Protein backbone atom coordinates (compact mmCIF):
# COMPACT_ATOMS: atom_id res chain seq x y z
CA UNK A 1 0.00 0.00 0.00
CA UNK A 2 2.64 2.52 1.09
CA UNK A 3 4.81 1.32 -1.73
CA UNK A 4 2.16 1.92 -4.42
CA UNK A 5 1.47 5.33 -2.95
CA UNK A 6 5.14 6.28 -3.14
CA UNK A 7 5.29 4.83 -6.63
CA UNK A 8 2.45 7.11 -7.68
CA UNK A 9 4.09 10.10 -6.03
CA UNK A 10 7.33 9.47 -7.87
CA UNK A 11 5.42 9.01 -11.09
CA UNK A 12 3.26 12.11 -10.70
CA UNK A 13 5.66 14.61 -12.35
CA UNK A 14 5.65 12.33 -15.39
CA UNK A 15 1.85 12.04 -15.33
CA UNK A 16 1.64 15.81 -15.16
CA UNK A 17 3.89 16.07 -18.24
CA UNK A 18 1.69 13.58 -20.09
CA UNK A 19 -1.34 15.61 -19.10
CA UNK A 20 0.29 18.78 -20.45
CA UNK A 21 1.22 17.05 -23.70
CA UNK A 22 -2.27 15.59 -24.08
CA UNK A 23 -3.80 18.99 -23.38
CA UNK A 24 -1.56 20.65 -25.94
CA UNK A 25 -0.16 22.93 -23.25
CA UNK A 26 3.43 22.69 -24.34
CA UNK A 27 4.39 25.40 -26.77
CA UNK A 28 8.07 24.51 -26.77
CA UNK A 29 8.28 20.85 -25.66
CA UNK A 30 12.07 20.79 -25.80
CA UNK A 31 12.44 23.39 -23.10
CA UNK A 32 9.29 22.54 -21.23
CA UNK A 33 10.25 18.87 -20.84
CA UNK A 34 14.00 19.32 -20.44
CA UNK A 35 13.69 21.55 -17.41
CA UNK A 36 11.20 19.61 -15.26
CA UNK A 37 12.68 16.19 -16.02
CA UNK A 38 16.17 17.44 -15.14
CA UNK A 39 14.85 18.97 -11.95
CA UNK A 40 13.00 15.83 -10.86
CA UNK A 41 15.96 13.65 -11.77
CA UNK A 42 18.30 15.53 -9.45
CA UNK A 43 15.71 15.79 -6.69
CA UNK A 44 15.03 12.06 -6.68
CA UNK A 45 18.73 11.33 -7.05
CA UNK A 46 19.47 13.35 -3.92
CA UNK A 47 16.54 11.69 -2.16
CA UNK A 48 17.85 8.21 -3.01
CA UNK A 49 21.29 9.29 -1.82
CA UNK A 50 19.81 10.63 1.42
CA UNK A 51 17.88 7.48 2.38
CA UNK A 52 20.86 5.61 3.87
CA UNK A 53 22.05 8.45 6.12
CA UNK A 54 18.47 9.19 7.16
CA UNK A 55 17.97 5.55 8.13
CA UNK A 56 21.24 5.55 10.08
CA UNK A 57 20.20 8.53 12.10
CA UNK A 58 16.52 7.78 12.60
CA UNK A 59 16.88 3.99 12.74
CA UNK A 60 13.71 3.94 10.68
CA UNK A 61 14.83 0.87 8.76
CA UNK A 62 11.65 0.49 6.74
CA UNK A 63 12.74 3.41 4.57
CA UNK A 64 15.47 1.29 2.99
CA UNK A 65 12.74 -0.59 1.14
CA UNK A 66 12.04 2.46 -1.00
CA UNK A 67 15.60 3.37 -1.86
CA UNK A 68 15.78 1.31 -5.04
CA UNK A 69 12.46 2.58 -6.33
CA UNK A 70 13.48 6.19 -5.80
CA UNK A 71 16.83 5.54 -7.48
CA UNK A 72 15.23 3.90 -10.49
CA UNK A 73 12.79 6.78 -10.79
CA UNK A 74 15.67 9.24 -10.67
CA UNK A 75 17.12 7.35 -13.62
CA UNK A 76 13.75 7.34 -15.38
CA UNK A 77 13.65 11.14 -15.31
CA UNK A 78 17.31 11.29 -16.34
CA UNK A 79 16.46 9.09 -19.31
CA UNK A 80 13.64 11.42 -20.36
CA UNK A 81 15.93 14.42 -19.89
CA UNK A 82 18.67 12.73 -21.92
CA UNK A 83 16.22 11.73 -24.68
CA UNK A 84 14.99 15.28 -25.12
CA UNK A 85 18.59 16.40 -25.49
CA UNK A 86 19.02 13.79 -28.26
CA UNK A 87 15.82 15.03 -29.91
CA UNK A 88 17.05 18.62 -29.66
CA UNK A 89 20.25 17.55 -31.42
CA UNK A 90 18.02 15.95 -34.10
CA UNK A 91 19.77 12.62 -33.28
CA UNK A 92 22.68 13.95 -35.32
CA UNK A 93 25.81 12.23 -34.05
CA UNK A 94 28.05 15.05 -35.20
CA UNK A 95 26.04 17.63 -33.27
CA UNK A 96 25.89 15.37 -30.22
CA UNK A 97 29.64 14.91 -30.14
CA UNK A 98 30.22 18.60 -30.73
CA UNK A 99 27.92 19.48 -27.84
CA UNK A 100 29.75 17.09 -25.50
CA UNK A 101 33.17 18.35 -26.56
CA UNK A 102 32.37 22.02 -26.42
CA UNK A 103 30.37 22.27 -23.22
CA UNK A 104 31.58 21.05 -19.87
CA UNK A 105 28.12 20.75 -18.37
CA UNK A 106 27.01 18.49 -21.21
CA UNK A 107 30.08 16.28 -20.77
CA UNK A 108 29.55 16.11 -17.02
CA UNK A 109 25.86 15.29 -17.44
CA UNK A 110 26.68 12.67 -20.04
CA UNK A 111 29.11 10.88 -17.72
CA UNK A 112 26.58 10.99 -14.89
CA UNK A 113 23.97 9.51 -17.19
CA UNK A 114 26.18 6.63 -18.36
CA UNK A 115 27.15 5.79 -14.77
CA UNK A 116 23.50 5.90 -13.73
CA UNK A 117 22.60 3.64 -16.63
CA UNK A 118 24.96 1.01 -15.17
CA UNK A 119 23.33 1.32 -11.77
CA UNK A 120 19.82 1.16 -13.20
CA UNK A 121 20.59 -1.98 -15.20
CA UNK A 122 22.15 -3.72 -12.20
CA UNK A 123 19.39 -2.70 -9.83
CA UNK A 124 17.45 -5.96 -10.18
CA UNK A 125 17.56 -8.78 -7.61
CA UNK A 126 19.10 -10.96 -10.22
CA UNK A 127 22.06 -8.66 -10.71
CA UNK A 128 22.47 -8.14 -6.97
CA UNK A 129 22.87 -11.91 -6.58
CA UNK A 130 25.10 -12.22 -9.60
CA UNK A 131 27.52 -9.46 -8.65
CA UNK A 132 27.66 -10.37 -4.94
CA UNK A 133 30.24 -8.14 -3.21
CA UNK A 134 30.98 -6.29 -6.42
CA UNK A 135 27.43 -4.98 -6.51
CA UNK A 136 28.08 -2.78 -3.53
CA UNK A 137 31.35 -1.63 -5.02
CA UNK A 138 29.70 -0.81 -8.33
CA UNK A 139 26.90 1.08 -6.64
CA UNK A 140 29.40 3.32 -4.88
CA UNK A 141 29.34 5.09 -8.23
CA UNK A 142 26.58 7.09 -6.58
CA UNK A 143 29.38 9.07 -4.89
CA UNK A 144 30.46 10.20 -8.35
CA UNK A 145 27.02 10.51 -9.93
CA UNK A 146 25.58 12.84 -7.30
CA UNK A 147 28.35 15.46 -7.48
CA UNK A 148 28.48 15.22 -11.29
CA UNK A 149 24.73 15.65 -11.58
CA UNK A 150 24.95 18.61 -9.24
CA UNK A 151 27.82 20.12 -11.23
CA UNK A 152 25.79 19.70 -14.43
CA UNK A 153 22.88 21.50 -12.78
CA UNK A 154 25.11 24.23 -11.37
CA UNK A 155 27.00 24.91 -14.61
CA UNK A 156 23.97 25.19 -16.84
CA UNK A 157 21.94 27.31 -14.45
CA UNK A 158 21.44 30.82 -15.67
CA UNK A 159 23.69 33.22 -13.87
CA UNK A 160 20.57 34.75 -12.37
CA UNK A 161 19.12 31.47 -11.13
CA UNK A 162 21.77 30.18 -8.81
CA UNK A 163 19.67 29.80 -5.68
CA UNK A 164 18.39 26.30 -6.33
CA UNK A 165 21.77 24.78 -7.25
CA UNK A 166 23.21 26.29 -4.09
CA UNK A 167 20.46 24.85 -1.90
CA UNK A 168 20.84 21.42 -3.50
CA UNK A 169 24.60 21.69 -3.01
CA UNK A 170 24.19 22.30 0.70
CA UNK A 171 21.78 19.35 1.04
CA UNK A 172 24.23 17.07 -0.78
CA UNK A 173 27.07 18.22 1.46
CA UNK A 174 25.06 17.55 4.60
CA UNK A 175 24.11 14.01 3.60
CA UNK A 176 27.63 13.31 2.34
CA UNK A 177 29.00 14.42 5.71
CA UNK A 178 26.61 12.07 7.53
CA UNK A 179 27.56 9.22 5.23
CA UNK A 180 31.27 9.86 5.80
CA UNK A 181 30.73 10.10 9.55
CA UNK A 182 29.13 6.64 9.66
CA UNK A 183 31.78 5.23 7.33
CA UNK A 184 34.58 6.41 9.62
CA UNK A 185 32.77 5.21 12.74
CA UNK A 186 32.74 1.64 11.45
CA UNK B 1 -6.54 55.58 -33.42
CA UNK B 2 -6.87 53.38 -30.42
CA UNK B 3 -10.37 52.55 -29.30
CA UNK B 4 -11.11 51.50 -25.79
CA UNK B 5 -14.45 49.82 -26.13
CA UNK B 6 -14.91 46.82 -28.27
CA UNK B 7 -17.78 46.24 -30.63
CA UNK B 8 -19.03 43.06 -32.15
CA UNK B 9 -18.21 44.38 -35.61
CA UNK B 10 -14.57 44.84 -34.68
CA UNK B 11 -14.30 41.29 -33.50
CA UNK B 12 -15.65 40.15 -36.81
CA UNK B 13 -13.09 42.34 -38.52
CA UNK B 14 -10.37 40.63 -36.64
CA UNK B 15 -11.71 37.25 -37.66
CA UNK B 16 -11.59 38.30 -41.27
CA UNK B 17 -8.14 39.59 -40.69
CA UNK B 18 -7.14 36.19 -39.39
CA UNK B 19 -8.77 34.49 -42.31
CA UNK B 20 -6.81 36.66 -44.66
CA UNK B 21 -3.66 35.71 -42.84
CA UNK B 22 -4.63 32.08 -43.06
CA UNK B 23 -5.20 32.49 -46.76
CA UNK B 24 -1.80 34.08 -47.23
CA UNK B 25 0.22 31.92 -44.92
CA UNK B 26 -1.83 28.78 -44.73
CA UNK B 27 -2.20 26.71 -41.64
CA UNK B 28 -3.50 29.41 -39.33
CA UNK B 29 -7.15 28.78 -40.10
CA UNK B 30 -7.34 25.83 -37.74
CA UNK B 31 -6.21 27.81 -34.76
CA UNK B 32 -8.24 30.91 -35.54
CA UNK B 33 -11.26 29.64 -33.62
CA UNK B 34 -9.24 28.99 -30.51
CA UNK B 35 -7.52 32.34 -30.69
CA UNK B 36 -10.77 34.10 -31.25
CA UNK B 37 -12.06 33.05 -27.84
CA UNK B 38 -8.90 34.24 -26.15
CA UNK B 39 -8.50 37.69 -27.59
CA UNK B 40 -11.96 39.16 -27.40
CA UNK B 41 -10.95 41.41 -24.51
CA UNK B 42 -8.00 42.93 -26.36
CA UNK B 43 -8.68 46.25 -28.02
CA UNK B 44 -8.66 46.47 -31.77
CA UNK B 45 -6.48 49.01 -33.51
CA UNK B 46 -7.89 50.47 -36.69
CA UNK B 47 -6.21 52.43 -39.42
CA UNK B 48 -2.87 50.89 -39.96
CA UNK B 49 -0.86 50.08 -43.02
CA UNK B 50 0.52 46.69 -43.82
CA UNK B 51 4.12 47.36 -44.61
CA UNK B 52 4.87 44.78 -47.26
CA UNK B 53 8.58 45.53 -47.25
CA UNK B 54 8.99 43.40 -44.17
CA UNK B 55 8.04 39.82 -43.62
CA UNK B 56 8.13 38.41 -47.11
CA UNK B 57 7.77 34.65 -46.90
CA UNK B 58 7.38 34.66 -43.12
CA UNK B 59 4.42 32.83 -41.66
CA UNK B 60 3.32 34.39 -38.38
CA UNK B 61 2.94 32.26 -35.28
CA UNK B 62 -0.45 32.00 -33.65
CA UNK B 63 -1.76 34.58 -31.22
CA UNK B 64 -1.67 31.91 -28.51
CA UNK B 65 1.96 31.11 -29.12
CA UNK B 66 2.99 34.75 -29.22
CA UNK B 67 1.07 35.68 -26.08
CA UNK B 68 1.50 32.44 -24.14
CA UNK B 69 5.23 31.96 -24.35
CA UNK B 70 7.18 34.98 -23.17
CA UNK B 71 10.44 35.94 -21.56
CA UNK B 72 9.49 38.91 -19.41
CA UNK B 73 11.23 38.46 -16.07
CA UNK B 74 9.38 41.40 -14.53
CA UNK B 75 6.42 39.02 -14.47
CA UNK B 76 8.29 35.83 -13.55
CA UNK B 77 11.02 33.70 -15.04
CA UNK B 78 8.82 30.94 -16.47
CA UNK B 79 7.65 31.27 -20.06
CA UNK B 80 4.06 30.92 -18.87
CA UNK B 81 4.36 33.38 -15.99
CA UNK B 82 3.95 36.66 -17.90
CA UNK B 83 0.55 35.70 -19.32
CA UNK B 84 -0.72 34.90 -15.82
CA UNK B 85 1.01 37.62 -13.84
CA UNK B 86 0.58 40.55 -16.22
CA UNK B 87 -3.20 40.27 -16.41
CA UNK B 88 -3.90 43.29 -14.22
CA UNK B 89 -0.94 45.37 -15.30
CA UNK B 90 -2.07 48.99 -15.75
CA UNK B 91 -0.86 50.62 -18.94
CA UNK B 92 -3.24 53.58 -19.09
CA UNK B 93 -2.29 56.32 -18.69
CA UNK B 94 1.33 55.71 -19.64
CA UNK B 95 4.06 58.31 -19.45
CA UNK B 96 7.39 58.21 -21.18
CA UNK B 97 10.19 60.45 -19.99
CA UNK B 98 12.61 61.73 -22.59
CA UNK B 99 15.95 62.96 -21.30
CA UNK B 100 19.56 63.64 -22.14
CA UNK B 101 21.13 64.97 -25.31
CA UNK B 102 18.11 66.30 -27.13
CA UNK B 103 16.18 69.52 -27.50
CA UNK B 104 12.75 68.41 -26.39
CA UNK B 105 13.10 66.72 -23.04
CA UNK B 106 10.21 66.09 -20.72
CA UNK B 107 7.53 63.61 -19.79
CA UNK B 108 4.95 62.79 -22.42
CA UNK B 109 1.79 60.78 -22.62
CA UNK B 110 2.29 57.78 -24.86
CA UNK B 111 -0.68 58.80 -27.00
CA UNK B 112 0.98 62.14 -27.65
CA UNK B 113 4.22 60.50 -28.66
CA UNK B 114 2.68 58.30 -31.30
CA UNK B 115 -0.14 60.55 -32.42
CA UNK B 116 0.01 61.84 -35.98
CA UNK B 117 2.15 58.87 -36.87
CA UNK B 118 1.04 56.26 -39.31
CA UNK B 119 0.78 52.92 -37.55
CA UNK B 120 2.06 50.07 -39.64
CA UNK B 121 2.18 46.33 -39.40
CA UNK B 122 5.54 44.65 -39.83
CA UNK B 123 6.09 40.94 -39.72
CA UNK B 124 9.44 40.23 -38.10
CA UNK B 125 11.19 37.12 -36.95
CA UNK B 126 12.14 37.24 -33.28
CA UNK B 127 15.24 35.21 -32.43
CA UNK B 128 15.67 34.61 -28.72
CA UNK B 129 19.18 34.23 -27.33
CA UNK B 130 17.94 30.87 -26.01
CA UNK B 131 18.01 29.47 -29.55
CA UNK B 132 14.35 29.58 -30.49
CA UNK B 133 12.41 31.85 -32.81
CA UNK B 134 8.90 33.05 -33.62
CA UNK B 135 7.40 35.20 -36.33
CA UNK B 136 5.30 38.08 -35.04
CA UNK B 137 3.05 40.58 -36.85
CA UNK B 138 3.89 43.71 -34.87
CA UNK B 139 1.97 46.93 -35.06
CA UNK B 140 3.71 50.20 -34.37
CA UNK B 141 5.91 52.98 -35.63
CA UNK B 142 9.54 53.24 -36.62
CA UNK B 143 11.87 54.25 -33.80
CA UNK B 144 13.48 56.90 -35.97
CA UNK B 145 10.18 58.69 -36.59
CA UNK B 146 9.62 58.95 -32.83
CA UNK B 147 13.17 59.87 -31.79
CA UNK B 148 13.49 62.60 -34.40
CA UNK B 149 10.62 64.44 -32.78
CA UNK B 150 12.76 65.03 -29.70
CA UNK B 151 15.55 66.50 -31.82
CA UNK B 152 18.63 64.71 -30.50
CA UNK B 153 21.81 66.77 -30.70
CA UNK B 154 25.28 65.84 -31.95
CA UNK B 155 26.29 64.45 -28.56
CA UNK B 156 23.56 61.83 -28.76
CA UNK B 157 25.70 58.80 -29.62
CA UNK B 158 23.55 56.25 -27.80
CA UNK B 159 19.94 55.76 -26.81
CA UNK B 160 19.14 54.20 -23.48
CA UNK B 161 15.73 52.66 -22.77
CA UNK B 162 14.33 51.79 -19.36
CA UNK B 163 11.46 49.51 -18.32
CA UNK B 164 8.99 50.47 -15.61
CA UNK B 165 10.07 49.68 -12.05
CA UNK B 166 7.01 48.78 -10.01
CA UNK B 167 7.37 45.87 -7.60
CA UNK B 168 3.65 45.82 -6.82
CA UNK B 169 2.56 45.47 -10.41
CA UNK B 170 5.57 43.51 -11.58
CA UNK B 171 5.99 40.75 -9.01
CA UNK B 172 9.09 39.39 -10.72
CA UNK B 173 10.96 42.48 -9.55
CA UNK B 174 10.60 41.31 -5.95
CA UNK B 175 13.21 38.65 -6.62
CA UNK B 176 16.81 39.77 -7.09
CA UNK B 177 17.18 38.03 -10.44
CA UNK B 178 18.47 41.08 -12.21
CA UNK B 179 19.55 44.40 -10.83
CA UNK B 180 16.15 45.99 -11.54
CA UNK B 181 15.58 48.51 -13.51
CA UNK B 182 15.79 46.74 -16.82
CA UNK B 183 17.93 48.83 -19.14
CA UNK B 184 18.74 48.42 -22.81
CA UNK B 185 20.65 50.51 -25.28
CA UNK B 186 21.38 51.05 -28.95
CA UNK B 187 23.83 53.21 -30.79
CA UNK B 188 22.05 56.18 -32.32
CA UNK B 189 22.69 54.69 -35.77
CA UNK B 190 21.08 51.41 -34.76
CA UNK B 191 18.12 53.24 -33.29
CA UNK B 192 17.67 55.34 -36.42
CA UNK B 193 17.90 52.32 -38.72
CA UNK B 194 14.58 51.85 -40.52
CA UNK B 195 14.28 48.33 -39.08
CA UNK B 196 14.11 49.57 -35.48
CA UNK B 197 10.52 49.58 -34.43
CA UNK B 198 8.37 50.59 -31.50
CA UNK B 199 5.52 48.10 -31.18
CA UNK B 200 2.24 49.13 -29.60
CA UNK B 201 0.25 46.18 -30.88
CA UNK B 202 0.27 42.82 -32.57
CA UNK B 203 -2.19 40.94 -34.73
CA UNK B 204 -4.18 44.12 -35.18
CA UNK B 205 -4.76 44.46 -31.44
CA UNK B 206 -3.24 46.54 -28.71
CA UNK B 207 -0.10 44.98 -27.34
CA UNK B 208 -0.99 42.38 -24.68
CA UNK B 209 0.63 43.11 -21.32
CA UNK B 210 2.84 40.03 -21.42
CA UNK B 211 4.35 41.19 -24.70
CA UNK B 212 5.59 44.47 -23.28
CA UNK B 213 2.57 46.77 -23.26
CA UNK B 214 2.00 49.52 -23.91
CA UNK B 215 5.18 50.20 -25.89
CA UNK B 216 8.22 48.08 -26.55
CA UNK B 217 11.24 48.10 -28.76
CA UNK B 218 11.62 45.58 -31.59
CA UNK B 219 15.10 45.21 -33.06
CA UNK B 220 14.82 41.97 -35.02
CA UNK B 221 18.48 41.58 -35.96
CA UNK B 222 19.40 41.36 -32.29
CA UNK B 223 18.57 38.72 -29.71
CA UNK B 224 15.18 39.18 -28.11
CA UNK B 225 16.41 40.58 -24.81
CA UNK B 226 17.50 43.76 -26.60
CA UNK B 227 13.87 44.44 -27.51
CA UNK B 228 13.04 46.05 -24.18
CA UNK B 229 9.44 46.03 -22.99
CA UNK B 230 7.10 48.46 -21.21
CA UNK B 231 9.35 51.46 -21.81
CA UNK B 232 9.07 54.44 -19.45
CA UNK B 233 12.25 56.31 -20.30
CA UNK B 234 14.22 57.19 -23.39
CA UNK B 235 17.55 58.86 -22.83
CA UNK B 236 20.04 60.16 -25.37
CA UNK B 237 23.61 59.95 -24.14
CA UNK B 238 27.18 60.39 -25.20
CA UNK B 239 28.35 57.27 -23.35
CA UNK B 240 27.33 53.72 -23.96
CA UNK B 241 24.75 52.48 -21.47
CA UNK B 242 25.31 49.15 -19.76
CA UNK B 243 22.37 46.94 -20.56
CA UNK B 244 20.94 44.74 -17.80
CA UNK B 245 22.01 41.36 -19.14
CA UNK B 246 25.52 42.54 -19.83
CA UNK B 247 25.72 43.79 -16.29
CA UNK B 248 24.39 40.48 -14.99
CA UNK B 249 26.68 38.20 -17.00
CA UNK B 250 29.24 40.08 -19.11
CA UNK B 251 30.81 36.84 -20.35
CA UNK B 252 27.48 35.66 -21.76
CA UNK B 253 25.74 38.81 -22.96
CA UNK B 254 27.21 41.86 -24.62
CA UNK B 255 26.01 45.28 -25.65
CA UNK B 256 25.42 44.49 -29.32
CA UNK B 257 23.78 41.04 -29.01
CA UNK B 258 23.50 40.75 -32.76
CA UNK B 259 22.13 37.41 -33.91
CA UNK B 260 25.14 35.47 -35.13
CA UNK B 261 25.31 31.70 -35.75
CA UNK B 262 29.10 31.81 -35.54
CA UNK B 263 29.31 33.18 -32.03
CA UNK B 264 28.07 30.59 -29.56
CA UNK B 265 26.60 31.35 -26.21
CA UNK B 266 28.95 29.82 -23.60
CA UNK B 267 26.25 27.32 -22.65
CA UNK B 268 24.78 26.47 -26.02
CA UNK B 269 25.23 26.69 -29.76
CA UNK B 270 23.67 29.55 -31.73
CA UNK B 271 24.01 27.75 -35.07
CA UNK B 272 20.39 26.69 -35.23
CA UNK B 273 17.11 27.67 -33.67
CA UNK B 274 13.94 25.81 -32.78
CA UNK B 275 10.91 27.23 -34.52
CA UNK B 276 8.40 27.40 -31.70
CA UNK B 277 5.45 25.08 -32.19
CA UNK B 278 6.63 23.65 -35.49
CA UNK B 279 7.51 20.08 -36.27
CA UNK B 280 6.52 16.93 -34.46
CA UNK B 281 7.03 16.06 -30.85
CA UNK B 282 10.07 13.91 -31.60
CA UNK B 283 11.34 16.13 -34.37
CA UNK B 284 10.97 19.79 -33.42
CA UNK B 285 11.56 21.88 -36.50
CA UNK B 286 14.82 23.76 -36.61
CA UNK B 287 16.25 26.27 -38.97
CA UNK B 288 19.77 27.47 -39.49
CA UNK B 289 20.25 30.74 -37.72
CA UNK B 290 21.19 33.56 -40.08
CA UNK B 291 23.64 36.36 -39.46
CA UNK B 292 21.67 39.36 -38.15
CA UNK B 293 18.65 37.06 -38.13
CA UNK B 294 18.42 37.40 -41.90
CA UNK B 295 18.41 41.21 -41.91
CA UNK B 296 21.94 41.59 -43.29
CA UNK B 297 20.82 43.80 -46.15
CA UNK B 298 19.41 46.37 -43.74
CA UNK B 299 21.99 46.39 -40.96
CA UNK B 300 25.30 44.77 -41.96
CA UNK B 301 26.75 48.16 -42.89
CA UNK B 302 26.46 49.27 -39.26
CA UNK B 303 29.11 46.77 -38.22
CA UNK B 304 31.62 46.98 -41.05
CA UNK B 305 34.66 47.57 -38.89
CA UNK B 306 33.53 45.67 -35.87
CA UNK B 307 34.86 42.31 -34.72
CA UNK B 308 31.56 40.54 -34.12
CA UNK B 309 33.15 37.74 -32.11
CA UNK B 310 34.60 40.21 -29.62
CA UNK B 311 31.67 42.59 -29.69
CA UNK B 312 28.99 39.96 -29.18
Image: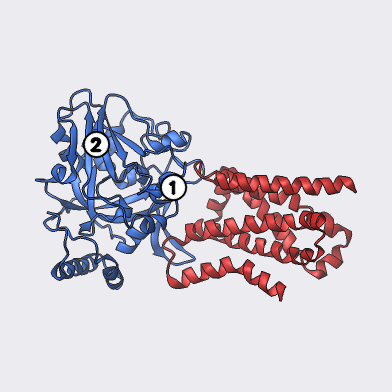
Chain colours: A red, B blue
Query: Which is nearer the eye, B85 or A132?
Result: B85
Task: Give the mark nearest the N terminus, 2 or 1.
Answer: 2
Q: Indicate which label's residue lies in the foreground, 2 or 1.
A: 2
Query: Which is nearer the eye, B48 or B293?
Result: B48
Which residue, given by chain and number where applicable, does mark 1 sit on?
Answer: B271
Q: Is residue A122 above or below residue B133?
A: below
Q: Find residue B62 and name its label.
A: none
Where does the N terminus of chain A fall, quadrant-wise?
bottom right
Q: Residue at x 47, y 64 (%)?
A: B283
Q: Residue at x 37, y 44 (%)?
A: B225
Q: Is residue B188 above or below residue B139?
A: above
Q: Find residue B191 and name its label.
A: 2
Instruction: Tell me the crowding category of disc 2: few under 14, some 14 to 19, or many 20 or more residues within 10 angstroms, Cα based.
Output: many
Q: Residue at x 22, y 67 (%)?
A: B18
Which image quarter: residue B104?
A: top left
Is B151 left, or right, of B257 in this rendering?
left
Which chain is disc 1 placed on? B
Amino acid sequence: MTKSLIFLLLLSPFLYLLFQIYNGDLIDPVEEITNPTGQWAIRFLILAFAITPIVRITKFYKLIKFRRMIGVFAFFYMLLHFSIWLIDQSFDLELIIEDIKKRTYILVGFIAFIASLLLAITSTNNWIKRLKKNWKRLHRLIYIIVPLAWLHFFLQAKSDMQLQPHIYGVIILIFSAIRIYFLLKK
Amino acid sequence: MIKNNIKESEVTDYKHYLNRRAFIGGGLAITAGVMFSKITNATTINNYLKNKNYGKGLEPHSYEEITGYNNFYEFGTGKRDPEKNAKNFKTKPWNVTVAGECKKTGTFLLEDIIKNQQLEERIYRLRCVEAWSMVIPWLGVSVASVLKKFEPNSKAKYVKFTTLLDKEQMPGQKRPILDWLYVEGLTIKEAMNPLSFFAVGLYGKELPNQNGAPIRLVVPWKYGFKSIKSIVKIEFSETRPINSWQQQAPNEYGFYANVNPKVDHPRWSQKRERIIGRGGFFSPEKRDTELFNGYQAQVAHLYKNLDLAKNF
